[in-house]
Amino acid sequence: MGNTFGHLFRITTFGESHGGGVGVIVDGCPPRLEISAEEIQFELDRRRPGQSKITTPRKEADQCEILSGVFEGKTLGTPIAILVRNKDARSQDYDEMAQKYRPSHADATYDAKYGIRNWQGGGRSSARETIGRVAAGAIAKKILKQVAGVEIIGYVKRIKDLEGMVDPETVTLEQVESNIVRCPDSDCADRMIELIEQIGRSGDSVGGVVECVARNVPKGLGIPVFDKLEADLAKGVMSLPASKGFEIGSGFAGTVLTGSEHNDEFYTDEHGNIRTVTNRSGGIQGGISNGESIIIRAAFKPTATIRKEQRTVNKAGEETVLAAKGRHDPCVLPRAVPMVEAMMALVLCDHLLRQHGQCSILPQ
């Protein structure tokens, strides 16, 4: 019912923002993969709230518990259950929002669809749901790195109208993690942090763009026609909370070029590999990876829950106003970086297994 993602590497997330906890069931993970709670925790720590002065002050350690599927440090090939318990919920902050709909949030649409909703913290529509994705993404990253040498790095590319200059072919995790906004362009990062602080003090919010690169991706991943690699990447990224746009390679900028300007011409490198001179395709052609770096961008809107007073209606349809309480990110971008990385990893890992399953059983 919309809570499961993937085919061979399949995840199902569960839990609400202010419930007992959130987590994920990972099914289809190959056996004998060495994995530890510490490796998963590293990714969760990059996503958790309260990590800096520009994120929500909600204090959650987001400590993961592996409940099944791992024995003596290795995966069993059986379902892996990972749980993170909620510790610092303040449900009383949402009392007013039980009746009043937050503009541009999921409150009104959840009521319209289900006729009931968990109004405490947004319930299932909260970004806390992504804990399960990030935990599963850590496992997917390990498989991709170990089997194919794939490296996935995301970073904040733009916040509002401030855009950093970043080379996706050379950017490192250390550069991304060198500042609290996760923009490897240090000069631009300082201006981004100042902007987020200023916006946060005014009770408002801002959005922006996360760019993510996957390097050393094997050729042949992706299944035409409905499971093209960029189609699954788009679905994965667009399923994230607050996401409003997806681009790959040249994206919308490519629409102003001619074919001769946009085409990635081929050549053979010194090792006999077929390569492309440019990478406007973003590493995918015809829905299949071509061996070049896969570069995607995800647009995130300004956080919907803000302290500024706005016009809205209540459940009875009566017009009213709302100045939301609670603890919320003035900008979701810094914490969205590991989320985008996770969705990239989940898609690529699933397609890696599918490629081996279909195309490696018989010799070429």
Image (cartoon, helix red, strand yellow):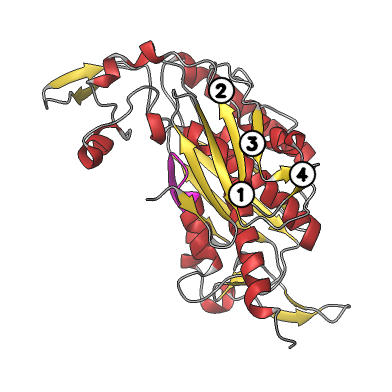
Q: Residue furthest right?
A: 270
Quadrant where the C terminus is found in the figure: bottom right
Q: Position of residue 292 (x, y in %)?
A: 70, 67
Q: Residues within 10 Å of mark 2 (few under 14, many from 20)?
A: many
Q: Nearer the viewer, mark 2 or mark 4?
A: 4
Q: Which residues are magenta?
A: 237-246
Q: Cα distance, mark 2 to mark 4? A: 29 Å
Q: Nearest the camera: 213 or 49?
A: 49
Q: Earlier in the sequence, mark 4 or mark 3?
A: 4
Which residue is tagged 3? Answer: 67
Which residue is tagged 1? Answer: 79
Q: Cα distance, mark 1 to mark 2? A: 33 Å
State yes or no: residue 106 in magenta: no
Which residue is tagged 4? Answer: 35
Q: Earlier in the sequence, mark 2 or mark 4?
A: 4
Which residue is tagged 2? Answer: 55
124 sits left or right of 115 in the view: right
Give yes or no for contact between labels 4 and 3 (Cβ–Cβ under 8 Å).
no
259 sits left or right of 356 in the view: left
328 above or below 139? Answer: above
Q: Amino acid at mark 3?
A: Leu
